[in-house]
Image (cartoon, rainbow, N blue to C red):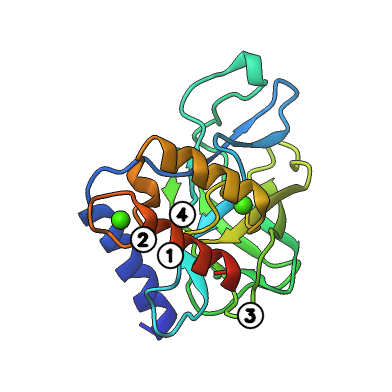
């Protein structure tokens, strides 16, 4: 097992051993026209936390997970996949700051490479990454889906967006700006511990000063 594979296993073990947290998921299904389709259930960007893996610097996380669409959803034109379908996702391109670890954990993928997902039902945790040099903003990973059994046609190209985790980014959009300042005031007024920046259980002026420090430094 090489280093990346060890990280992959460690990351998934950490996830399965942890508490039952709500987490981000990407569902893969098909349309009524039998074209593969991908559905994101939460607003993007996906927020990547600072890496806990020494060998994978930057912001690295094993969510969003990728699952097979569990139930037919005609309103979204998203239906479950047949058990004999066999799904791969194919990388189209990324912003320079964003990357996706290969399915065997050996390297960061390059455009044109594919990542084996498999036959339904699946629930996998790819390793997504933003490089240490990534600053404020939203960074893209573009991909499409292919069924190697030939049952379904290729999906369209989807763009997933990612941002760094930053405690001053209260609007969770990857940017530190005045909208975050206003959001801070909202949390502050109601004493929401989201803005208890010094972790003392109270929301007070000390947290305001700490927020300003984070705000000024751009995280
Ligand atoms: Ca923001
Ligand atoms: Ca506090």
Q: Residue under label 3, please give it.
A: 133
Q: Residue under label 1, please give it.
A: 210
User: Looking at the image, which is closer to me, 42 or 87?
Assistant: 42
Residue occupying the point 52% across, 63% down: 212
What number is the disc on residue 206? 2
| Secondary structure category for the residue under label 3 | loop
Q: Are marks 2 and 4 in contact (CB under 8 Å)?
A: no
The disc, 3 or 1, on the residue closer to the chain's N-terminal end is 3
Label 2 Cα crowd, 10 Å radius (few <14 / some 14-19 / many 20+): some
| Secondary structure category for the residue under label 1 | helix
Point out the image quarter for the C terminus: bottom right
Q: Residue under label 4, please give it.
A: 63
Mark 1–mark 4 distance (CA, rounded to whole Å): 29 Å
Residue occupying the point 42% across, 43% down: 188
The disc, 2 or 3, on the residue closer to the chain's N-terminal end is 3
What number is the disc on residue 93? none
Mark 2–mark 3 distance (CA, rounded to whole Å): 30 Å
| Secondary structure category for the residue under label 4 | loop
The disc, 2 or 4, on the residue closer to the chain's N-terminal end is 4
Mark 4–mark 3 distance (CA, rounded to whole Å): 21 Å
């Amino acid at each position: 097992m090489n280093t990346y594979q060890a990280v992959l296993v460690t990351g998934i073990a950490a996830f399965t051993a942890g508490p039952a947290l709500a987490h981000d998921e990407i569902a893969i299904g098909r349309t009524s026209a039998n074209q593969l389709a991908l559905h994101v259930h939460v607003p993007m960007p996906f927020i990547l936390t600072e890496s806990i893996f020494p060998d994978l610097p930057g912001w690295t996380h094993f969510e969003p997970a990728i699952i097979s669409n569990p139930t037919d959803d005609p309103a979204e034109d998203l239906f479950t996949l047949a058990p004999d379908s066999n799904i791969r996702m194919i990388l189209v391109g990324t912003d320079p700051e964003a990357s996706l670890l290969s399915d065997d954990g050996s390297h960061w993928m390059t455009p044109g490479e594919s990542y084996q997902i498999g036959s339904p039902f699946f629930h996998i945790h790819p390793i997504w990454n933003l490089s240490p040099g990534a600053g404020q903003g939203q960074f893209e990973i573009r991909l499409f889906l292919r069924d190697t059994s030939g049952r379904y046609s290729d999906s369209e190209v989807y763009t997933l967006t990612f941002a760094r985790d930053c405690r001053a980014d209260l609007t969770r959009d990857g940017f530190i700006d005045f909208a975050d300042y206003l959001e801070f005031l909202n949390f502050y007024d109601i004493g929401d511990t989201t803005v208890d920046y010094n972790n003392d259980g109270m929301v007070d002026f000390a947290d305001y000063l700490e927020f300003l420090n984070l705000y000024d430094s751009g995280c």
